[in-house]
Amino acid sequence: MTIGGSLAAVVLGAAVGVLGRLIAPGRPTMPVWLMIAVGVVAAFAGTGLSHMVGLESGGWDYWETLFQIAVAAVGVYLVAMFWPTSGTR
């Protein structure tokens, strides 16, 4: 993974985490920092997945970016979906 790929994973993961907070159905009870963290970790997982599939290339890669965004969005959605509501903690 290049420095650019790592930077893209952090930026895209954080952006997807914040957007997940904004578009989550109902009133999200999950902390913002956790959504951002899940987005960043999932974006790194997307990078790893794109490399496992063999979509890596030198420099910026469209498919790697797409994998980062998709995996981060799914990760944030799943964690938000299973996060307990404020009344059940």
Image: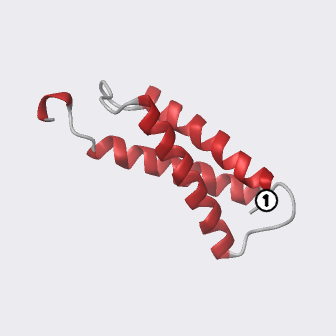
Q: Residue at x 60, y 67 (%)?
A: 49
Number of residues whose C-alpha sits closer than 10 Å to that of mark 1, classed few (under 14), some (14–19) or many (20 or more): few
Residue 44 relative to residue 64: left or right = left
Residue 3 relative to residue 78: left or right = right
| Image quarter (top left, top right, bottom left or bottom right) of the N terminus | bottom right
Residue 38, above or below 15: below
Q: Residue at x 64, y 75 (%)?
A: 52
Residue at which label 1 appears? 2
* Residue 26: percent from left, percent from top: 30, 26
Q: Quadrant of residue 64?
A: bottom right
| Image quarter (top left, top right, bottom left or bottom right) of the C terminus | top left
Relative to the observer, which residue lies in front, 35 or 78?
Answer: 35
Residue 29 relative to residue 15: left or right = left
Relative to the observer, which residue lies in front, 10 or 73?
Answer: 10
Q: Residue at x 76, y 68 (%)?
A: 56
Which residue appears farthest toward the right when viewing the image?
58
* Residue 39: percent from left, percent from top: 52, 45
* Residue 85: percent from left, percent from top: 20, 33
Relative to the observer, which residue lies in front, 2 or 47?
Answer: 2
What SS does tag 1 mark?
Answer: loop
Residue 23, above or below 14: above
Residue 11 relative to residue 45: left or right = right
Q: Check disc 1 and give the amino acid type.
A: Thr
Q: Residue at x 27, y 41 (%)?
A: 83
